[in-house]
Image (cartoon, rainbow, N blue to C red):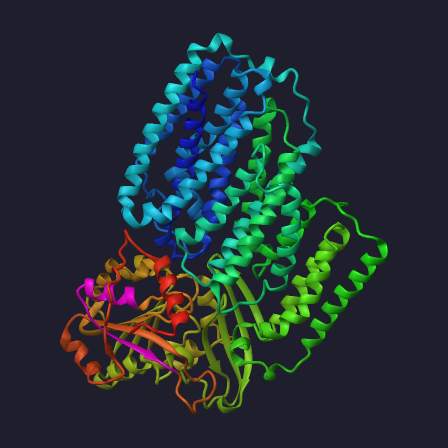
Amino acid sequence: MAPALFVVTVFASAALVFMVEPMMAKLVLPLLGGTAAVWNTSLAFFQAALLAGYVYAHLLQRARSIRAQIVVHSGVLIIAALVLPLRVSAVLGDPRPDAPALWLVGVLALSVGAPFAALSATAPLVQAWHARTYRAEEAREPYALYAASNLGSLLALLAYPVVVEPLVTLQGQTLGWTVGYAVFFVLLMMLGLSLWRGAPRVRSAPQADAAAPQISWRDRAIWVGLAALPSSLMLGVTNYITTDLGSAPFMWVAPLALYLATFIVAFQSKPWLKRGVVLLLQAIALPVCAAFIHFWTRNFLQEAGLHLATFFLTALVCHQALVARRPAPARLTDFYICMSLGGVLGGSFNAFVAPLIFNTVAEYPLVLVLCCLARPWGFGEAPRTQTWIAVGLGLAGAVIAFLLVQTPAPLWPLEYRLIGHTKPLDVAAPVLGLTVVMAFLLRGRLWTFLPMVLVLIVTAERISDRSDVIGTWRSFFGVVRETRGHVARLGGEVRMLAHGTTLHGAQALDPAHRCQPLVYYAHETPIGQVFDAKQAAKPAVTIGAVGLGAGTVAAYVRRGDALNFFEIDPLVFRLSTADKVFTYTSQCAKGQLGYVLGDARLTMNREPAGRYDILLIDAFTSDSVPAHLLTVEAVRMYLTKLKPDGVLILHLSNRNLDLIRPAEAVALAAGGHALYQNHDTLPGLPELWDTAEDAVIVTRSEAALAPFKADSVWQPVQPAGVAPWTDNYTNLFGAMVRRMRDQWTGRGRQG
């Protein structure tokens, strides 16, 4: 039989497995507000399904006849195909805001669980068949098939955001995957027929296993641990780099692709990256990453590059240590089960356990420290005197860094205090740099290298977090933090609400300023201008606001007005409606307030047509961007909810993505009439009074837009050739590239 048939079959199954992961996550993403947790939870589910497939493959190996295995596996693939073509199962209904993770796991299990698990079992099964088919001198060959499996996975992942997503609609993707499943089944039947004919020459399972050494539970525990650490780290770094960007396949793919690449390198018979080189490079990258893990810079590529490089090297260290302990080919299904179990434990820890036990995203730095355990424990030991000198210098750097924390907070820019990052990198870098160098010098001793990395993380966190934090909470949708600062011109103390690294509202406690809408919602901003104009024209208005934040919009509600908030995160709802936190909703609003929990595309679609004078879509300011709220279909739906003279406000301020051009294109493609405004903070106002802001307003008719055209601050929209986003097409990668280009060239949207 042709050995190439083994490789092609494994390659095809792996490509289908990893093509469907971002595809299914994108299908369910709009139902859960576009949050980055959708991908982490989905990935944890897929790891569990992968484990189920490996366990099934392991149990199937107990069948002594390879013909029986072929028949059983073919039947399983046929039964699993009954759920195709791919779609989001409607059995569980709409997601529940109070239990989104459980809903997501259930939907994925019903929608794709069976074919995914069946495909996952193919790689270890085919490799086991290969081991039982060829001679003993070729016994190590099945591990090369594992590299081929990961190569197929990697190519499929890279193809999805580069080729599949931009060029093929979601409907076309799901249909294409179903066709691919059928093609794979034909390949497997060809391989099975070849093995069936050669069955008399195939060794039985007992014959193949007789000479293989037994595996201890200690070995299994080490395999599980070495697999769990990089799995957890992958989800941690994904969560980190998507905090301020859209939750989209191109952002998910990079960490997962690097994760698969480490398997390809580690399982090579002659790795192109030797273990000693990898250990040296990781000893450089890991301390640097630890030192600056809590700092956010304005250069996304620089920051993401550091974290992704550190992740790649650290995962490779773990996987090379794992491969060094691999068993004989006859025990490979046992080995793969332990590897898969480790992946499930690592992913499940991030997706399900960490949000319950940590109120911040502490799992990422924690696992970075634990990954040091995968390094050789006594490799390259330095002389004792050199070691103690390095330890002393490293600790001195940490102490100096800690003492700098005592510098009065008012000396640092307010921008940093708002989100908890108050030490600029030009001050922190030299201080932490000394400890980084010492950690590198101590890389050969685990008992010194690991504590140094831990000291760097703890010290950097202490330096970066100088805001006066009142409370921190975490939910499926992210980390929310309440802080306070002092603004004399606002009467003293000001409370602030931050989601991730983004300010989502502020309120002065002084009674004279308590009901003054601040930051994005001040009267001087585009949002405030629209509210003031509509309220001046009508004695009573009806308002809808997507995104509750601190509830600042409620300050505009007069007697006779009505405001409905559409909010997906129950945690934000609790914080913004409790008297002891923010009081815009409880003390400042004079009219009727309503709250609707759930994703706005689902909940607003149930609203009656022609209800609102103003619709504010305020869900795009730097946290993971819910792109499904900015598509042609979404805007078309918003416009139907407006009165004939109503105004739709798209608040598009974002540090890392150019959302202006797509929004302008979407507004026109949806049949609306639109204007754009770029607002800069006005001189002479107190801190936090207003902020820089980008906004697009859309109306159903030219007449409704006329009052704003008369004001020169509003400009005609200029889509500039950018394709409008739809439910079948979004291009967050292009939005990121345009923002970077604008920042590098100093040109804005008009450039």
442 vs 558, left or right, is: right
668 vs 318, left or right, is: left
Which is nearer the eye, 344 or 365?
Answer: 365
**Position in image of residue 629 (x %, y %):** 32, 61
Residue 669 falls within the magenta-colored stretch: yes
Query: Residue 289 is drawn in which quadrant?
Result: bottom right
Q: Residue at x 41, y 28 (%)?
A: 8
Which is nearer the eye, 162 or 197?
Answer: 162
Q: Which residues are magenta?
A: 661-680
Q: Is residue 33 above or below residue 299?
A: above
**Position in image of residue 309 (x %, y %):** 55, 53
Residue 567 in view of the camera? yes
564 vs 639, left or right, is: right
471 vs 673, left or right, is: right
Q: How many marks?
A: 0
Which is nearer the eye, 624 or 254?
Answer: 254
Residue 413 falls within the magenta-colored stretch: no
